[in-house]
Amino acid sequence: MRTKSLLLPLAIAAASATSPAIADFTGGDFIFRVGGSYIDADSTSAYSSRNVIDIVDPDDPDGTIPVEIRERITFDSDSSWFINGTFFVADHWAVELYHMNQADMDADYTITATGQDIDILRRDNLRGFDTSVTSLFANWYPVCVESWVQPYFGLGVNYTDIKQDFLRPVFIEDVINDNGQFVGRADRGLMNFGSSWGWTAQVGIDIEFGRNANWLFNASAMWVDADPELELGVDNIALRNDIVFDTIRIREDLDYDSWIFNLGVGYKFSF
C-alpha cells in the first residue's frame, strides 16, 4: 500500500463570504468538509466468469483443444483525500456531493488455463492504478436539530473510475534466440479497466467543536457498489511446452465493490 499525503484545504475562504449559521442543523445550512479516506475492496480477490477458448492441439496441428480460462485480481488498499459539500434542503434532510480523489491501488493478476492434460497458472503484478469515487447522497439526520452531535444515514449513487493512460502489460516474457541468449523482453498481454455507475450507502457523524461552534469533526463509512469493465487481450503466449495461446480476448464486468472510511473536518454556514 502506498499512502499519499492527506490534503486538508481550509474552508475559511468559502465561509468568509457567507454569514455564520447558528449551531442548529436546519434547512438552508451548508457544510463543507475535507479530510482523509481509506479505500478497501469488499473482497480481496475478484474472479472473472468462465471463458472457454480453443487452442491448437500440439499433437495434431489440424485439431483443437478446449481450454477454460479464469482470471483473478487480488486488490491492495490505499489512502487518499476527500472533499464534499452538504446542503440541508429541510430540517433533518440534506443532499451531499462527495469525491474521493485518486487512490493509487496495487493488484496482482493471475490467469489459469485448464483442459485435457493442461493445468497452467501464470501470475503478474498490475502495478498501480488510480481509483476515484464520486457519489451523490440523500442524507437523513434523525436527532433533534439543536444537538451538537449529529449522526446521519445516506443512500445514493456513485461513479467509480479507474484511470490509466495506457493499456498495462499483463505478461512480460524474456526473449531467447536460437543460441540460448537473452535478447530482450516482450509484452504478451494487455489489460484495460473502465468505469461504472452503482449505488452507495453510508453512515456518519458530525460533532461540533463546542455547542455554539461552526467547525466540526466528521467521520463516515461508505459501501460502494462498482462493476467496472475489464478488457483482457493476450497474443502468442506459450504457457507450457509447445502449447501456445494465439489469441485471448475477454471483456466483462469486474466485481469491485469497496468500503471507504473517512475522517475529516468541516465548517457549517448559511448563505
Image: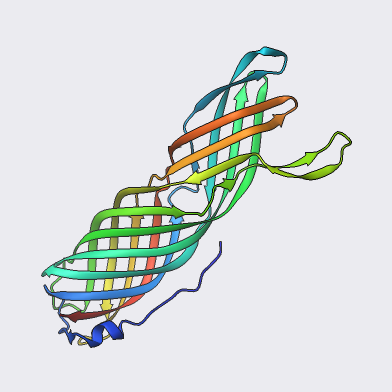
Q: Quadrant of residue 221?
A: bottom left
Please count the marks in the image.
0
Residue at point 70%, 31% (across, down): 238
107 or 220, which lies in front?
107
Residue at point 24%, 56% (across, down): 155
Viewport quadrant of the N terminus = bottom right
Q: Is residue 147 shown left or right of residue 177?
A: left
Give the farthest residue toward the right.
Answer: 179
Q: Is residue 161 above or below residue 24?
A: above
206 or 5, which lies in front?
5
114 or 217, which lies in front?
114
Viewport quadrant of the C terminus = bottom left
Residue at point 81%, 39% (across, down): 176
Q: Is residue 25 shown left or right of residue 219?
A: left
Q: Is residue 50 above or below residue 142?
A: above
Q: Residue 26 in the image: state x and y as whole percent.
A: 12, 75
Q: Quadrant of residue 149?
A: bottom left
Rendering colour mode: rainbow
Q: Quadrant of residue 80?
A: bottom left
Q: Residue 249 in the image: state x and y as whole percent.
A: 52, 32
Residue at point 74%, 24% (across, down): 242
Q: Residue 119 in the image: state x and y as whole percent.
A: 65, 27
Q: Residue 210 in the image: state x and y as whole percent.
A: 25, 86
Q: Is residue 174 above or below residue 18?
A: above
